[in-house]
Every structure is written in structure tokens, then in C-alpha cells.
Amino acid sequence: MTSVLNRLQLLSGNNFLGALVLTAAITVTSCSKKAVPPPVSPSKPIENTVKEDVEKGAKEPAVFSRNSNKIPVISLVLPFNVNEVDLTTANTKKDMEPAAVALDFYQGFRLGLDSATQSGNKIKLQVFDSKDDSVEARSIARKQAIINSNLVIGPLYPAEIRSFNPIAVENQQYFVSPLSPRVVVKGNPFFIVPVCPLEIHARKAAEFIIKKFETNRVMILKGSDSDEDNFVKPFKVAFEEQSIGTNINEYRTTTNLFDPMAAKLVKGQNNILLISSANKAFWQALLKFLDKNSKEYNFTIFAYPGSEKLTNSLGLKNLEKYNVYFTSSYHVEKNDPGTSAFYTKYKQVYATDPNEYAIKGFDIGYFFAKLLSSHITDYDKYINKFYNGIHNNFQFVKTDNGFLNESLKVLKVENSKFVEQK
């Protein structure tokens, strides 16, 4: 991924480009004395262009002016929770917990923005505090500064997204749901989802099984937390569409007992199991069952999205032993030169290593800043351009529910590490 390395080479000594103007709405509300400033101060003074709208009680314009913006305007709507964080007393990481996810995402996003504007392009960034509150999110959606933004990133959480959504539809406002793996709202053509929805994971698993193993037989294991509508049903539909004479068996347990399932296994063949649970106890019981029956039966496992987070509990050796595959919308290869350069630069700027939210923020910031810099008024026509990121790949496809990212990776543990499967 040398392209990422090239993005970062010019960052040395640059504490955020003066061309990048940050409008921090969370710092200009006259009634609040507790303000969370951006994690890294910009090199030039902040322009309070939002303050005028707030103080005058600006109404929604009859005609959108975003198409006349000379430089792209991106607005971040994140739950900084400034009402819960007092910087005059905050000294530890725990003190900052109410704002942790937002700050991590912001820091990565800001670094992505700076990387994307190294060639001289300009982006105006506005930051709003949604306070993890659906009423506040709706209020923000009605602000003139938001309506006239070329793109909105956020809100983060489902309740806020649902509250923000109808105003966005009314104003034909594209907005990105940066962290949610679900299509939280339906029928909005202006909704952008970078994290692959569960339905796409299900389809990818079905396609990979049919192509890789040339089989029409699979067993679906269900637990008490299985997502029937968003994962199991889409998998069955995709599997049946692409395979002739399919044989799909299902086994459900609410007590994590798997012994009765043995009657459905076939000796001398590869028993492919699709797991529709990310519950740790479910997985631990399943691995014990596999241990008990591994001499009589062969197994290949396809995990429920997000189950890779159980790796420390389940053990890499077990995951490798039983051929466990994972569909994942993200995978960080730390040995890649570009990724290594990103980690080094992030630690230089923020004095800490990036976490998952920071890396997601970088990829989203870089991708959309580049996109808007080239196509400020019609970027929706070019959003389908493939992006190979540090954490995520993006391949957006237009659907009835907006633009969904359909780029997924299939991972498998080999030699005690996750390796992407082609």
C-alpha cells in the first residue's frame, strides 16, 4: 500500500495546513464555559463563521448556497459531550471518557484531511458537538452552516442518525454514518455507509464459500443473539441464488449445547459451518465441540462479523486449527510500509498510537477530502472510485438506501496472524 506512504511523506513539520480552516462550533456557544477545543490547534486562528448563524438564529435558506462554495465545506457532527468534560480538571484518560470515541475519530480524521490537502487543495472543516443526544442532533441538522456544507460526517449513533435523517433528506444533504455497520435509515439516497452492513457480509460469505469450496451444502449455527433478518436470511438468499440444489441445514441452541448437532454432520466431507453469533460463551462451547469431534469430522468455519474481536479469548491456535474464516470491512497490516508510516506520523502528532476509531477517521477523512477537492458539486458521481486504505477499503455502490460500501476482506489465521484471502 505504497500510496498511503506517499500521502504521508510531506507531512513532516506541518502542524495542520493554514489552508485548512477549522470552524469549531463547540467552542463558540455563548452559554457554555466548558469547551473542548480540537485536539491539535491549527496553525492559524479559528474562524468563528458558525457563531454568526447561531447568534442571529439563522433560518434555513430557501436556496441552498452549498453549490456556490469556492472550497469544499465538511462538517463533523460528533458526540464530544462538552457538557460532561471540564478541561480545567481533566488530567487522565478516564476524565476524557465521555469524549473518547469522538476525539479519537477526530484526530485520525484531521490527519487524513491534512494528508489529502498536501498538494495545496483547501478544505473548510466545521465541528459540532451532538452531545450524544437525538434532540441536539436534529437541532444541528437545521443549522444553516450544516445545510450549506458539501458533506456532513456523522452523527455516530443510531438514535442521532434517525433524528438527523429527515432533515438531511429534506435538504438533500449527503451525510456519512462513519461507524455503524447497519443501514440505520431506509430509503434515503443521501445516506453514505462506509462500514459494510451485515447483509453485505452475508453475501460475501456465501460467494466465497461457493467459489472457494465448490459446495452447495452448509450448516448455519444460531444462538440466542443471532440476527435473522440482517445476516441469516441474506446469506440464505445469496447462497441459494448462486448454487444449484442447495442444502442448508440449521441448528439453534440457546444453552450452548452442540452435541445434538453431530447427527447432521457428514464424515469424509468438509462440514462448513456458518456462525451467526459473536457471543464468547457460544464460541467457547463450539470450540470444545470441535475438539471433541475433530478426529471423525472435518470442519471449516465462517464467523459472524466482528467475531475476530474474540481472538484473545478463543486463541489464535484454535482459530487456525479449525479453518475459521472472517469477513471483515477492515484489516490493519502493520508491516506494510504505508501503514507503518501512518503509525509513526500519528504518534509524532498526538503522542500516542492510533486506535480503531482513529484509523477509521483517517481513511474517511482522506477519502472524502480527496473526493471533494476534485469534485466539489458532483462528487456523488465519482464516489464509487475504489479506495485502498489503511483500515478500510471503500467501494461504494448506489442503492435505494444510499451509498453502501461493498468492499470486504476475507481473513484467515495463518501462522498465528490474520492473512487476507484472495
Image (spheres, rainbow, N blue to C red):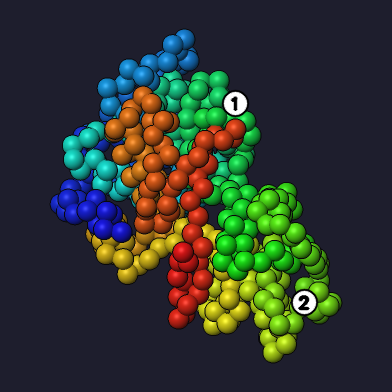
Task: Identify which residue is drawn at 39% across, 41% down.
Answer: 385
Q: Which residue is mark 2?
A: 265
- Residue sitting at the far top: 62
Three-letter code for the amino acid on which mark 2 is drawn: Leu
* Mark 1 residue crowding within 10 angstroms, few (<14) / some (14–19) / many (20+): some
Q: Look at the picture and state if 153 lies above or below 95.
A: above
Q: Quadrant of residue 21?
A: top left
- Element on which disc 2 rests: loop
Residue 132, relative to residue 358: is it above or below? above
Q: Earlier in the sequence, mark 2 or mark 1?
A: 1
Residue 96 in view (yes/no): no
Nearest to the observer: residue 339 or residue 208: 208
Residue 16, horizontal then vertical, whole percent:
23, 44
Q: Is residue 313 left or right of residue 154?
A: right
- Taking the image as shown, residue 329 lies to the left or right of residue 217, namely left
- Does 173 sit left or right of 359 as displayed? right
Please indicate, yes or no, whether residue 152 appears anywhere in the rendered image: yes
Marking on residue 166 = 1
Q: Position of residue 69 (x, y in %)?
A: 31, 21
Question: Which residue sits at x=29%, y=32%?
Answer: 374
In the image, what residue occupies the spot 63% across and 71% down?
A: 301
Query: Hey, what amino acid is under mark 1?
Result: Pro
Q: Is residue 357 above or below residue 176?
A: below
Q: Is residue 175 left or right of residue 295?
A: left
Between the C-alphas of marks 2 and 1, the distance is 49 Å
Identity of the residue furthest to the front in this view: 244
Q: Position of residue 378 (x, y in %)?
A: 38, 26
Give the vertical position of 338 relative to 366 (above or below): below
| Camera-side mark, 2 or 1 | 2
* Residue 179 - label: none
